Image (spheres, helix red, strand yellow):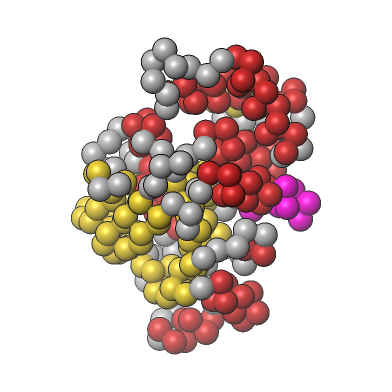
Amino acid sequence: MADYTLEIKDLHVSIEDKEILKGVTLTINSGEFHAVMGPNGTGKSTLAAAIMGHPKYEITSGSVTLNGEDLLEMEVDERARAGVFLGMQYPSEISGVTTSDFLRSSINARREEGNEISLMKFIKEMDGALDDLEIDKNMAQRYLNEGFSGGEKKRNEILQLMMLQPGIAILDEIDSGLDIDALKVVADGVNKVREETGLGCLIITHYQRLLNYIKPDHVHIIMQGKIVKSGGAELAQRLEAEGYEWIKEELGIEDETVNA
Ligand code: ADP
Ligand code: MG
């Protein structure tokens, strides 16, 4: 697989003239798993949405490049075609498009014209991924996320990850609302892609629990819209044992949200 580098430099992001991200710098290379952790309201989802080009999020300064190319200049679908994938905290329901059709057209969008995946190969790969994720085969024929439970939506995000095989994935709270069995299934799916493709990944999570199953190489804590601390997996373990209070004390802050 090709090597990818996603480089975020001093990124400032506003929503409706309110500054949410106040200078985030982070580089993710192929094969590296970076966890971004932090309390609620500190800017984690904003980081994911801004990288993927959600129209509500205005980049006021800083840069995001993929292999040296300006990602922020690309249309949203170009970013996906360039190899960046976003697994969303709250996936949207798309009526009229089945999961299967959505996956097949997303795969083909990343391939040259005339080199589309054959229907046979697609079905074989999709069935394999559905089995891995313990998803009912009928779900692929239902409209994307429509009427899916919270857990089904999360599995469906990882189904897309497994099928699309991006260079860099940003996974926003894929653990929220999952019970422990579902969490293991989802983590196994991510780890399989990690092993097979050399995926680089930004895993956003509120809780340390997910990181017991998906081992990060680097852990970054975000507060007040900035990365305030970085370390290895041991940093996440300390958060599990002690919560976030000690970091707030260390930094001398009372309010960790972006509103501070
Ligand atoms: P996190 O994912 O860390 O919980 P978010 O990035 O979702 O935090 O949100 C950070 C802050 O940005 C929120 O507390 C909220 O005040 C503001 N915010 C986020 N999304 C929106 C939005 N769509 N419209 C207005 N304000 C928003
Ligand atoms: Mg969030």
* Residue 71 located left or right of residue 161: left
The residue depicted at 39 percent of the width and 32 percent of the height is: 81
Q: Position of residue 68 (x, y in %)?
A: 25, 48
Q: Which residues are magenta?
A: 175-185
Residue 119 visible here:
yes
Q: Report if residue 73 lies within the magenta region.
A: no
Res 251 quadrant in image: bottom left
* Residue 25 located left or right of residue 108: left
Q: Position of residue 165 (x, y in %)?
A: 52, 37
* Residue 5 located left or right of residue 125: left
Residue 243 visible here:
no
Between 238 and 21, the one nearer to me in the picture: 238
Which residue is outermost to the left? 61
The residue depicted at 35 percent of the width and 51 percent of the height is: 6
**Quadrant where the C terminus is found in the figure:** bottom left
Total of numbered circles in the picture? 0
* Residue 118 located left or right of residue 221: right
Q: Position of residue 138 (x, y in %)?
A: 74, 22
**On screen, residue 98 above or below 36:** above
**On screen, residue 102 above or below 240:** above
**On screen, residue 101 above or below 80:** above
Res 222 quadrant in image: bottom left
Between 247 and 230, the one nearer to me in the picture: 230
Q: Position of residue 67 (x, y in %)?
A: 30, 47
The residue depicted at 58 percent of the width and 44 percent of the height is: 196
Q: Report if residue 176 lies within the magenta region.
A: yes
The residue depicted at 63 percent of the width and 46 percent of the height is: 192
